[in-house]
Amino acid sequence: MKPIFNPQNNEQTQTDVLLAPEEVAVAGKQIVLYNDDFNTFDHVIECLLKHCKHDVLQAEQCAYIVHYNGKCSVKNGSYKELEPICTALLEKGLNAEIE
């Protein structure tokens, strides 16, 4: 989450910011989800909703990116934060790793 100041109403709000791949290295680690031939879109989306705390649109977009590009970064953070999430994805049969 990144704080953003709105000068129109003098309020500061928090918003998620998507990072370009070269910026991810600076921000820490990432969970990369890889395509496979046996998990359904619904299963992948359910896992991203539950374990990565994605909203529906983000989970759907990641599932399509994985399907068409072969992989997608689905969560950023420290190794300590990402390890239990990646483990949960692996236990659900997804192909993921922390990079």
Image: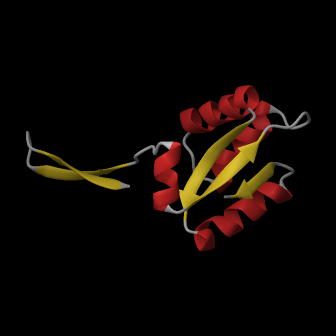
Question: Quadrant location of residue 70?
Answer: top right
* Location of residue 72 with respect to 84 vertically, above or below: above
* Location of residue 45 with respect to 83 vertically, above or below: above
For the view shown, which residue lies furthest in the right direction?
38
| Count of picture labels | 0
Q: Is residue 28 left or right of residue 31?
A: left
Foreground residue, 53 or 90?
Answer: 90
The residue shown at (77%, 64%) is 87
For the view shown, which residue lies furthest in the bottom direction?
80
The residue shown at (46%, 50%) is 23
- Residue 1: percent from the left, percent from the top? 38, 55
Image quarter in which the C terminus is found: bottom right
- Residue 30: percent from the left, percent from the top? 60, 56
For the view shown, which residue lies furthest in the front direction?
22
* Location of residue 82 with respect to 35 vertically, above or below: below
Residue 47 visible to an observer of this rendering: no
For the view shown, which residue lies furthest in the top direction?
68
* Location of residue 34 with respect to 89 vertically, above or below: above
Q: In this view, does 45 lie to the left or right of 77?
A: right
The residue shown at (66%, 55%) is 51
- Residue 63: percent from the left, percent from the top? 69, 34
Looking at the picture, the colour scheme in use is secondary structure
Q: In this view, does 51 lie to the left or right of 20?
A: right
Q: Is residue 8 left or right of residue 82?
A: left
Residue 88 visible to an observer of this rendering: yes
Foreground residue, 16 or 76?
Answer: 76
The residue shown at (58%, 36%) is 56
